[in-house]
Every structure is written in structure tokens, then in C-alpha cells.
Image (cartoon, grey):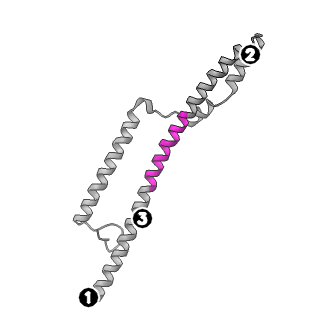
Amino acid sequence: MVDTSDRERLADNQAFRDFKKILLQAVAILEAERSRDKKDAAHKEPPFKDLFASLSTAPLLQKIEAAAQRGEKASSVLPLVEDFSIDFEKNVAQIERRLIYYSRLATIGVIAAMLLHEIRNHTFTLGRLLRAVRKLVE
């Protein structure tokens, strides 16, 4: 691949066209995955606020207070705590899945930025080398 003289793009040659084709295929695959994730009904992302609201102990406390006011024994309160614990674990697992999902998206962005940086560095260096060789030849 060869830099253009204005260093704004790569020269249109076979290597560039092959590279562009590979990048477009990679982007198409990523877009298809993203589109599939968006269409997947199980993948609808609720707001983060909803996730963290579900981690509140307020509903449990209200149920325990109501049970105490009714004069119920501690053994009748235990199922409330167990139910809350099950819901809590489900919410923690959902938060973990969403954080992993967003972490993967961020990783793709970082990889793309690094790849672009490395390609530009090498094409710039190759361009400088070619200009120096051209001067020597002249």
C-alpha cells in the first residue's frame, strides 16, 4: 500500500483494493452480528437505571416490616429473604452480561484505532523511505 502525496489516503492500487475488500468484509460481519443482537428480543437493553434500582433492599425491608406488623415469626420471613436473594443474583448476572457486552464493543473500537494507527505509521515510514530512495535515484 502506498500513501498519496497529501498523506490523506492510500493510493488506489491492487493492494489497497484487497485491503479495502477485507476491511469491508470484516465490517459486514460485525454489522450482521450487531444487527442480529438488536433483533434478538432477549437482547433488548433496559436502561442502566433499571438494573441498579433492582439492587435496592427497600422492597425486602417493606415486606419484612409488613410481616413483623402482622406478628409473623422469623421462619415466615425467611422465604422473603430467599426470594430476594434469588432476584438479586439474577440482577447481578444480568449486569455482568451487559458489562461484558459493552466491554467487547469497546475492545473492538480500541482494536480498530490501534490497527489504523499502525497502518498509518507504516505507510508513512514507507512513504518516507520511497521518497528518500527516489532522491537517491535521481
Residue 117: x and y, percent? 42, 64
Which residue, given by chain and number where applicable, does mark 1 sit on? 137
The majority secondary structure of the magenta stretch comes to: helix
Which class describes the residues within 10 Å of circle 1: few (<14), some (14-19), or many (20+)?
Answer: few
Residue 123: x and y, percent? 35, 71
Does 41 appear in magenta? no
- Amino acid carrying mark 2 in the image: Ala
Q: Nearer the viewer, residue 79 or 107?
A: 79
Left/right placement of residue 61 relative to residue 87 reads right
Distance CA(mark 3)–CA(mark 1): 30 Å
Which residue, given by chain and number where applicable, does mark 3 sit on? 117
Distance CA(mark 1)–CA(mark 2): 93 Å
- Amino acid carrying mark 1 in the image: Val
Question: Which-is-in-front pick, marks 2 and 3?
Answer: 2
Residue 44: x and y, percent? 46, 32
Which residue, given by chain and number where applicable, does mark 2 sit on? 74
Residue drawn at (61%, 34%), measured in percent from left and top? Answer: 52
Left/right placement of residue 4 relative to residue 62 reads left
Extent of the magenta region: 93-110
Q: Is residue 125 above or below residue 42?
A: below
